[in-house]
Image (cartoon, rainbow, N blue to C red):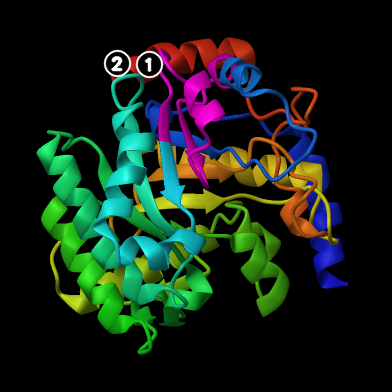
Amino acid sequence: MAKVVQIVFLMASILMAATVVGAYDILLGAYYGLVGDNLPPPWKVVQLCEQYNIRRVRLDVPDVDVLTAFRGGAIDVSFGIPNNMLTDLANNKGLVEEWFNTYVKTFVDDFRINYIIVGDKAIPSHANFILPIMMSLQDLLNANYLGQVKLTTLVGYNAALVSKDPPSSGTFDPTVRESMRGILKFLAEEGSALMVSVFPHQKYEFNGGISLNYAIFNETNPVVQDEGLEYYNLFDAMVDAFYAAIEKEMVGEVNIVVGETGWPTCGDISGTQAIAKEYNNKFKSHISSGNGTPRKPNVYLEGFIQSIFNEDKKPEGDSQCYGMFDVNMKPIYPLFSTATAENMFMSGKKN
């Protein structure tokens, strides 16, 4: 009942909230999922991204038709190696090179590849296979003078961390700690970031005792105080739990990129368009500010909102409902205007 009251109270103010545009919107991206049978053709998706200044996209897998559509444009692309390929690639460098030639070497001159993501929340199930593949790929990147392409892996909040609250207690689960330590050492040496999955919505729904204001960046007073740091939103607390875990491994400096975050528009009592609009707009403003997190102030965060479209072939419930746009290319809720997007594009190109 308390959550229902919070939602009713917030909806009126949320619907009136204005979108805040920062100077670093080029750090904002979107997840482009393909698990649907009614999605627009890729060339239309490229136009949509250009119209709304989505300057970076992340794909689960490097679909050739999708990558071809992005050729010649100014949109950066990240894509991953699916979990079902990790075992084979870890044990066969020839297969790694074949994958590299097909998806990286073929397209690297046509658009910027930000990240190759070795595994999607593959820890702990495939933890031992990630680093060998990263090392093989790095050898290929070095041989082809592609130092601008960075490697990472997408790590889940609950699967990777055994301790999370307060943020300073963040610690990797003992079952994956050795694997994580090797991966982090590699990332530190190569100047890459760890990609993490951060969904305050899920923690708000399932943990209890968390206010909606804290979950959607609307608190004006600190909710958590931890080792002299103040937390006004759940997102920062979740990210800093990862940072605390990384620091405990003492392998060097490793930044974080938020590979996926968002708020669903259906599926449960807190999945409403108004709240999704509020969370995504506030998230965009938060990372665009360049303020970082309490544990890492003034360290810019890259972030990918999940997702561009609702995907009707995902499991029923929340997972189908994270889209910002309907499959007819119309916004499900106002994220930002085309006029604003044009201004963002101009400032983004300069940064």
Q: Helix, strand or loop at disc 1?
A: helix
Q: Helix, strand or loop at disc 2?
A: helix
Locate residue 32: give its quadrant: top right
Locate residue 14: give its quadrant: top right
At horizontal 79% and vertical 54% (from top left) the residue drawn is 271
The segment highlighted magenta reads 49-77
Q: Nearer the viewer, residue 36 or 262?
A: 36
Disc sitting over residue 11 in the figure = none
Q: Nearer the viewer, residue 77 or 244?
A: 77
Whether residue 330 appears in magenta in the rendering, the answer is no
Relative placement, left or right, of 288 versus 216 is left
Asked if the residues shown at circle 1 and circle 2 are in contact, with their CB atoms under 8 angstroms apart, the answer is yes
Residue 205, compared with residue 297, is above or below; it is below
Percent coordinates x, y for residue 110 in the rendering? 35, 19
Q: Is residue 298 visible?
A: no
Residue marked by disc 1: 347
Relative placement, left or right, of 254 versus 127 is left
Percent coordinates x, y for residue 97 in the rendering? 27, 46
Q: Is residue 98 visible?
A: yes
Whether residue 56 appears in magenta in the rendering, the answer is yes
Residue marked by disc 2: 350
Mark 1 and mark 2: Cα distance apart in space: 5 Å
| Type of the residue with mark 2 | Lys
Residue 27, compared with residue 89, is above or below; it is above
At horizontal 78% and vertical 31% (from top left) the residue drawn is 326
The crowding category of the residue bearing disc 1, from other C-alpha atoms within 10 Å (few below 14, some 14 to 19, many at least 20), is some
Relative placement, left or right, of 31 versus 134 is right
At horizontal 84% and vertical 61% (from top left) the residue drawn is 268
